[in-house]
Image (cartoon, rainbow, N blue to C red):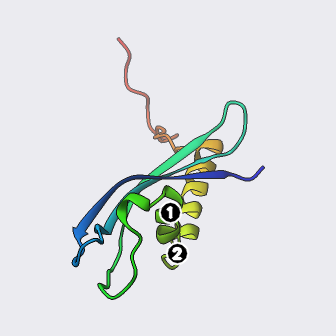
Amino acid sequence: MSNTYVWTVTGMSTLPAPPAPINDYVVWATYTVTASNGAEPPITASIANNAQFSISYTENPIPYDELTQEIVLGWIQDQPGIVSIIQNTLDQQIYVQEHPPINPMPTPLPWSEPPPTE
């Protein structure tokens, strides 16, 4: 079963955009991505991250109050390689939870005498 991913914008920062009536330019967005393996009970992993956007005052920006989460997520996901980097990282985190590593344990040397017991 493949993992599913939920992307959520958790915050944005803006700079004023002259001239009026344009509101503000979004220059920074914070977001989380949560992955689930779909099992019962599901194993999940999550990453919180941020994205910075460059702005140009000659572009036709969308007024801040008309932005949707889908628009901002599109900007985030349009950054080169970000989707595959985030999803691969989450896949690895889920894999480790599904297949916990076996940690080596210190073991007494077989030629050592055991310490005396009292």
Along the horizontal axis of the image, is 51 left or right of 4?
Answer: left
Q: Position of residue 43 (x, y in %)?
A: 62, 39
Which labelled disc corresponds to residue 60?
A: none
At 49% from the left edge and 40% from the top edge, which residue is drawn? 105
Question: What amino acid does circle 1 point to?
Answer: Leu
Pointer 1 local density, CA inside 10 Å: few below 14, some 14–19, many at least 20: some
Q: Is residue 75 above or below residue 68?
A: below
- Mark 1 and mark 2 lie on one chain; the one further toward the N terminus is 1
Q: Which residue is mark 1?
A: 73
Which labelled disc corresponds to residue 78?
A: 2
At 32% from the left edge and 80% from the top edge, which residue is drawn? 55
Q: Position of residue 44 (x, y in %)?
A: 58, 42
Question: What amino acid does circle 2 point to?
Answer: Asp
Q: CA distance from mark 1 to mark 2?
A: 8 Å
Q: Position of residue 46 (x, y in %)?
A: 49, 48
Q: Is residue 49 above or below residue 52?
A: above
Element type at mark 2? loop
Work out which residue is located at the far top of the displayed protein and give it: 118
